[in-house]
Image (cartoon, rainbow, N blue to C red):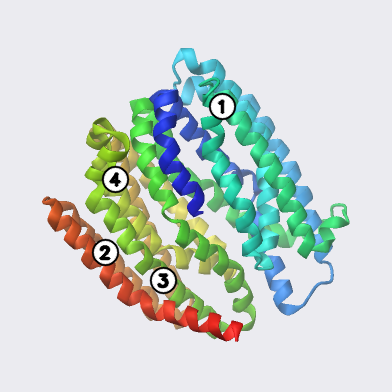
Amino acid sequence: MVAPMLIALITIPLLIDGMGKERFGLLSIIWIGVGYFSLFDLGLGRALTKMVAERLGRSELAGLDLLIWTALNLLAVLGLIGAILLIIFSQPLVTGLLQVPSELCDEAIAAFRVMAVGIPFVILTAACVGILEAHQCFGVIAKIRIPLGVLTFVGPLATMQFTPSIACATTVLLISRMLAFVVYYLAAAQVQKELLRPRLFDGRQVRPLLSFGGWLTVTNIVGPLMTYLDRFLVGAMLGLTAVAYYSTPYEVLSRLQLLPQAIMGVLFPAMALAHGVDKNRLVALYVNGGKVIYWTMLPVTAGVLLLAPEALLLWLGEDFRDAATPVVHWLAAGWMLNTLARPSFTLLQASGRPDLVAKTHVAELLPYLGLLWWLAGIYGIVGVAAAWTLRVTADTLILNILVAKQMPALRSQAVRICIDVLATGVAFLVFWTMDPIILRFGTFAVVSGLAALRLWPFVRALAKDRFLLRG
């Protein structure tokens, strides 16, 4: 995950200069679309990961081939449906919702239709990755993910040397996703031999898949909708140039979440296995995983907030600094508070209660839409960032309260996290008021030192484990 982030820091300024702010704003929406393809899998990819991990943990391998192939067949059909729908609605999406300038409409429609072709490949890839995660083959996943992530940014940069067309850039993204599917499938087949022996659809496997995946579908629709709706609203209300000012810091901050994403990706199958066979291990995974990601991300997000004006000026120039600094302040605080929601989100799904996560997101949707529309109309992209941060703060508190109610063994830890949410919010508000650069640098150094002290026991334990494994 680090490699694409570093490439993004280099390529994004070049893409903005070469394509222009409006085309780059459109490209950022296409990147969002690629990530939102999970909408079409009805939660089956995540359900497959959980069920394969549980069966491996209990050594229940009978019928595993039917389960896997039923999921893959369902995902293929759903992917085709999603592709057809996006092809049909690409024109009204471009000309109506996004209000793309007339001179860019044709290439924008072509880009969305090219993107539609990739939907089946992307959601089938997610299933293959899920199988690899269930087997804890994270090294294999990383070896494939690195070049794929790099191509996300390098591909459009390469096509820009010949044409600024968004359609050409999207075509390169499509080809990279198709190749990634082939490689992931072959890698998954090495650990799950059933993938080498195609099977037909088995109706008996549908109910267990959909019973878990159904609520995940709600989360997959509402969760990403609340995550990505802000940029669509900015494009519709404020124009594609405003999308570039907003989405650029958002994309960088979201990619700084690589460690929480990596840890939670590992913990989901581990929690699913532990939930059925070892409750003490489940508690340890929840508590220690939460501590590690909090103290790792605190200096990162605090540093972004404290040093945003200087960093934006050096990276993207004075215009971006003036427009995006308040956005960065809000988003940095929001991403830090969102970090405290990740263990609870993962635990609830891994323990078989995805319905609680889905109901939470549904309850948040309408209030968030109203808040987003209201603050965007008054404060522009700064209001959009504020609305997003307020929403993820509420989400973090609700999910931890649900964990406290569902699992008495974790009640004290969940309550502590709620207190941490409030304390962290106050701390970031104080950081925001600091003006002299020497004071901001000094605060960043203090926060980093404190985080290092809190992380040291985990680093020492990891080093000891490695020594024992080697010796």
Query: Is 223 positioned to the left or the right of 91 in the image?
Result: left
Q: Quadrant of the C terminus?
A: bottom right
| Three-letter code for the amino acid on which mark 3 is drawn | Val
Which of pointers 1 and 2 indicates the residue nearer the eye? 1
Callout in the foreground (1, 4): 1
Quick check: marks 4 and 2 in contact, CB under 8 Å?
no
Most extreme residue toward the left, as rendered?
436
Residue depth check, mark 3 versus mark 2: number of the one nearer the observer: 3
- C-alpha separation, residue under disc 1 versus residue under disc 4: 30 Å
Q: In the drawing, does residue 415 fall left or right of residue 423?
A: right
Label disc, if present, on residue 159 of the rendered structure: 1
Task: Check residue 182 in the rendering and tell me which mark sits there, or answer none.
Answer: none
User: Hey, what amino acid is under mark 4?
Assistant: Val
Report how far apart the C-alphas of labels 3 and 1 lie in the structure.
Answer: 40 Å
Q: Which of 34 and 170 is in front in this view?
A: 170
The percent coordinates of residue 448 (x first, y second) are 28, 66
In the rendering, which numbered label is found on residue 424? 2
Residue 384: image quadrant is top left
Is the C-beta separation of discs 1 and 2 under 8 Å? Answer: no
- Circle 1: element type: helix
Residue appearing at x 42%, y 64% in the figure:
399
